[in-house]
Amino acid sequence: MKLEAVNDFVVKFANVNGSGSASANTLFAKSILRMGVPVSPRNIFPSNIQGLPTWYEVRVSEQGWLGRRGGVDLMVAMNPQTWEKDVAEVEKGGYLFYDCTKPLAKDKFRDDVQVIGMPLMEICNATYTDPRQRQLFKNIIYVGALAQLLDLDIAEVEKLVGEQYKGKEKLLEPNIKALHMGLDYARDHLPAIGLTVKRSDRVGNRIFLEGNSAAALGCVYGGATVAAWYPITPSSSMAEAFAKHCRKFRTDPDSSKARYAVVQAEDELASIGIVIGAAWNGARAFTCTSGPGISLMSEFIGLAYFAEIPAVIFDVQRAGPSTGMPTRTQQSDVLSCAYASHGDTKHVLLFPEDPKEGFEMAATSFDLADRLQTPVFVLYDLDIGMNERLCEPLSWDDSRRYDRGKVLSYQDLEAGKRFGRYLDLDGDGITWRTYPGTHPKRGSFFTRGTSRDRYARYTEEGSAYVDNMQRLLKKFETAKELVPAPILRKSGKGSRFGVIYYGSTAAAMDEALVLLEGEAMAVDAMRVRAFPFADTVLDFANSHDHVFVVEQNRDAQLRTLLIAEGMLPPEKLTPVLHYDGTPITARFIHKEIAQRLSAFNVTPMRKTVSGD
């Protein structure tokens, strides 16, 4: 038996980090995309520079599934160190493509997998004398072979190579030659396989975009002019993308002067300090970091919360604790961000599902921070931030105006408008503020991280402290009406069971829900997009007998928030947890929920065969 599929399979490349395989593997994925077939690639790489194993997984799905499916249909095994693990991942009837220059023992293979050997190193040794060229062109040669095996349009591959080496014509010709060496060898020597890419039109007008770049562009459109950061995986490329976008959109065309500031601080604490100072002065400012950075920023985050200064913090989550797995993905900073800093704090969190929402929520976060005068966290993760994803085109309403919140102008103060920096005049918990230098005599106040009264005067009077802390809670309640609303997805006939999920889990969840529905085990679903939770989130949980909470961390952090903040009974919420550092798969979600539904005596639909 051998697998047969058209535009619906998974290819995984097993390479060594630093071997130059990344560009070749990306070339392969984009070639399929250019043929109108949706792909979803994921780069799984180590935190060192070179030498350790790296994988690149490409989901090919004409149906448009963008999450990881689970399992591999074609393994391109180029790393002897991970051979056994890589071979074990191949589906029964699947294909194993490898370099057969050096023969391997029979027990290294599986009887239920189709083996395709190609003497890649032998070909390279016969063609190239430079060791580095041998390695680099080996990658292009296997892309050519795969193009032949999968029936890719070689013209599309050649076009992409031309774009990659535009302006470097000396490199273009040898890469095209290597591509055709692989193509010709596969055509003349390798057997046909059952996996095929057929030109389609299912990509539509969607774009292929990395999450960090999308969020950085959202910051530009959201009015940010200051970014302060300290390099940390996987967020560094966001700061770099912001600088790139600003050079294009925030440079004065006449004077060529920069109308922005990007500061690489000495550490994460300094970076959030710069953000707070800039925001206090009226600029829209942000920092981007990951879990360890949030830990270091904690003290200043508390200052911004208590002094009520806008700040936007992008946390591109990775696997912790401590250094953890810096280049692996998780959703493990939910609790640390929700309650960042010591004392009683509650922060606004946004959970984008893909680059498009990353763009939108980045822009929205600055309005929220100004409107609420508080830190706002945008929590996505490495899976979104550092991988390219198909998404709907980014859009912007040119009539949109920034929400700067309650800011008194010179005219307001001159007219005698009542001002107390921490005085709530309309009951929403949000007070009026002024920018430094607004008025020479009125509207000034002392910004402090110590207890004060409604007029910013220092006091340790208990009643004044309680009054202030209760107002901050009221402001948090107001935030419920301002943050992005959750998205409800009801099954066809409705269900006694529900599932709550968020962020990058959505891509795999979309497919898992269809799999469950196909077995008559449908559940209603709600994607949470922000904290504080809208009342509809709690209504959803309360209206179902049981709710699964799917997330990518060990300690069920979103579930913990639902219990703590929504007063939901723990026994009502069943955690479904995936936290090995790889993106969650549709098969994992389907299996975990189906097994638990079976325990609740929900019987899946069975096929029946009737006799004559």
Image (cartoon, rainbow, N blue to C red):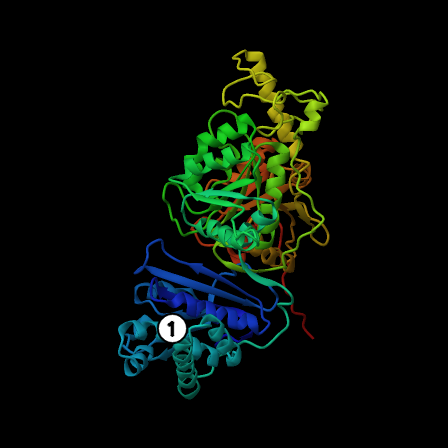
| 369 displayed left or right of 339 | right
Query: Residue 62, position in %: x, y?
Result: 60, 69
Query: Residue 607, position in %: x, y?
Result: 63, 65
Q: Judge whether residue 135 can be spotted in this image.
A: yes
Q: Is residue 315 above or below residue 67?
A: above
Looking at the image, which is closer to me, 527 or 208? 208
Query: Residue 310, position in %: x, y?
Result: 56, 34
Q: Is residue 525 above or below residue 306?
A: below
Residue positioned 42% across, 46% down in the render: 319
Looking at the image, which is closer to me, 186 or 364? 364
In this figure, which residue is indicated by the disc labeled 1?
Answer: 139
Determine the secondary structure under disc 1. Answer: helix
| 252 displayed left or right of 323 | right
Residue positioned 44% across, 47% down in the render: 318
State the quadrant of the C terminus.
bottom right
Q: Is residue 449 above or below residue 491?
A: above
Q: Is residue 409 above or below residue 157?
A: above
Which picture quadrant has residue 53?
A: bottom left
Considering every residue shown, the one lying at the far front of the view is 255
Which picture quadrant has residue 22?
A: bottom left
| 385 displayed left or right of 124 | right
Considering every residue shown, the one lying at the far bottom of the view is 188
Query: Residue 555, position in %: x, y?
Result: 47, 40
Q: Amino acid at mark 1?
A: Asn
Q: Judge whether residue 553 can be spotted in this image.
A: no
Label 1 crowd (10 A; few <14 / some 14-19 / many >=20):
many
Q: How many marks?
A: 1
Looking at the image, which is closer to me, 185 or 589? 185
